[in-house]
Image (cartoon, rainbow, N blue to C red):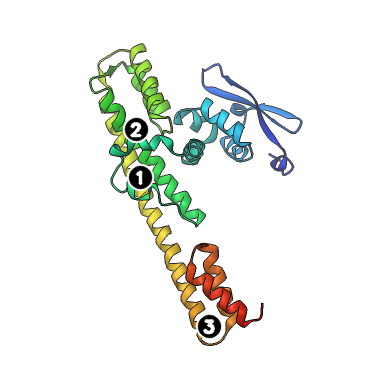
Amino acid sequence: MTAIALFSAVRIITLSYGLDLRPDALAEEGDRRFWLSEQSPQDNDSLFGRLSKRDRERLLNHIRFPGDREALFGKEALVGLAIADHELTNWSGLKSLRENLPPGAEAILSAPQKDQEAENARKACLVWAYSAALADYLAKRLPEAKMGDEAASFLSDVILSGPLSLKPDDAFSVIETIIKESPGNKPLKSALSVYRKTCSLRFQASLRDYYALAEKTTGRVRELYLKGVEAYANEDYRTALFYWREVLKLDPDHEEAKRGAEKAERMLGK
């Protein structure tokens, strides 16, 4: 894509399906129209970030499964797309799955971070936690379900190949339809068990990354605040004000830094 195209308005014109029955979309950028399947996954990933919220919602609702999203956006984009999908529904799906959440997920469910990098890491944790919980939820609702080879392949390649963001009832309806259309002897529970374990492991890895970032942010706030205290004690009010303003960039609700900054401003006659 050209540098000019990066700043062009982008919108989704038509949602459709290709000859292979994979979901596709016709987009418009400036005077150019193209199908997402005609572009590289990297181009589509960049394009997604420039769509309106309405077009993002339309596209995510149309391209629902990880396997289809990977084909159009690439594997690296799967977690980001799942996060965007959950943001559109305000994480409402998690409320009905809390009893199935992996250990550690409940503690960060309502703990948004002010630092954007730490917040993105928290959301990545919740995406994998949601997918693991959804696998358990489906296994409990369909404990004796079995399927044929075709259904097993479809589940592995299209649905269970990345983080899921379908609402519980929607996921149940999809799985139930697939099983009915492809009966066989392969237990659904086995496939969901493998998927749940994979998602749980990815959740644990993401959780470690999240806590490292959260602690890094917390430690940085403490360090900057104390540097401000030291500067103020040495009557270096300008430096103290600098450090406390840096604290407030990371933690806008830090009351001690707010009061310190006000005192430093008074001493500087601001």
Between the C-alphas of marks 3 and 2, the distance is: 53 Å
Task: Provide the residue designation for mark 1.
Answer: 203
Q: Residue at x 57, y 28 (%)?
A: 58
The numbered mark, 2 or 1, whose residue comes first in the sequence reads 2
Residue kind at label 3, given as amino acid type: Tyr
Quick check: 33 above or below 213? above
Task: Provide the residue designation for mark 3.
Answer: 232
Task: Provide the residue designation for mark 2.
Answer: 134
Residue kind at label 2, given as amino acid type: Leu
Kindly state the secondary structure of the residue where label 2 is placed. helix
Quick check: 251 above or below 132? below
Q: Give the x, y percent position of residue 87.
A: 50, 40
Residue kind at label 1, given as amino acid type: Phe
The numbered mark, 3 or 2, whose residue comes first in the sequence reads 2
- Name the residue furthest right: 31
Side (left or right) of 192 relative to 242: left
Q: Nearer the viewer, residue 88 or 2?
A: 88
Kindly state the secondary structure of the residue where label 1 is placed. helix
